[in-house]
Amino acid sequence: MAGLPSPAELTDGFADEARFLLALKLFEQGRISSGKAAVLCGIGRVAFLLAASRAGVPVVDLSSDDLDDEFA
């Protein structure tokens, strides 16, 4: 199959990246909490939230009314 890396081409960090991407997707879908996602990745919750934000996944889900209350 063209395009698939051989096992020799996979980097040492591939498994870590795969775990992070899985946890990120599950968190994005609301299927797991940020804490559970962090455990799945083997990192702290704050580190996971920062990485999720850098990956473009919103880490706060507030309604317009909630945002208005926050900044009132």
Image (tube, grey):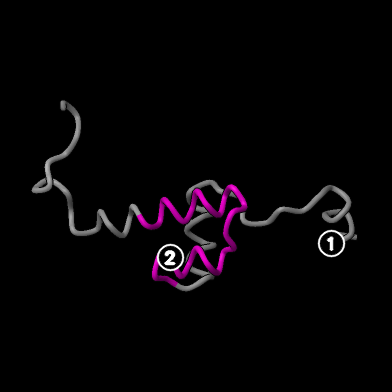
Q: Residue at x 81, y 49 (%)?
A: 63
Residue toward you, 26 or 62: 26
- Checking the image for residue 29, the label placed there is none
Dot 2 crowding, Cα within 10 Å, few <14, some 14–19, many 20+: some
Residue span colored magenta:
19-43
69 left or right of 17 in image: right
Q: Nearer the viewer, mark 1 or mark 2?
A: 2
Q: Residue at x 16, y 39 (%)?
A: 5
Residue 17 image-quadrant placement:
bottom left
Cα–Cα gap, marks 1 and 2 = 31 Å
Q: Residue at x 91, y 60 (%)?
A: 72
Q: Amino acid at mark 1?
A: Glu
In the picture as drawn, the residue positioned furthest to the left comes out as 8
The residue carrying mark 1 is 70
Looking at marks 1 and 2 on the same chain, the residue that comes earlier in the sequence is marked by: 2
In the picture as drawn, the residue positioned furthest to the bottom comes out as 44
Q: Position of residue 45 (x, y in %)?
A: 52, 70
Q: Pointers 1 and 2 in contact (CB under 8 A)?
A: no
Q: Is residue 50 magenta?
A: no
Q: Amino acid at mark 2?
A: Leu
Secondary structure character of the magenta stretch overall: helix
The residue carrying mark 2 is 40
42 left or right of 13 in image: right
Q: Position of residue 40 (x, y in %)?
A: 43, 65
Q: Position of residue 16 (x, y in %)?
A: 31, 60
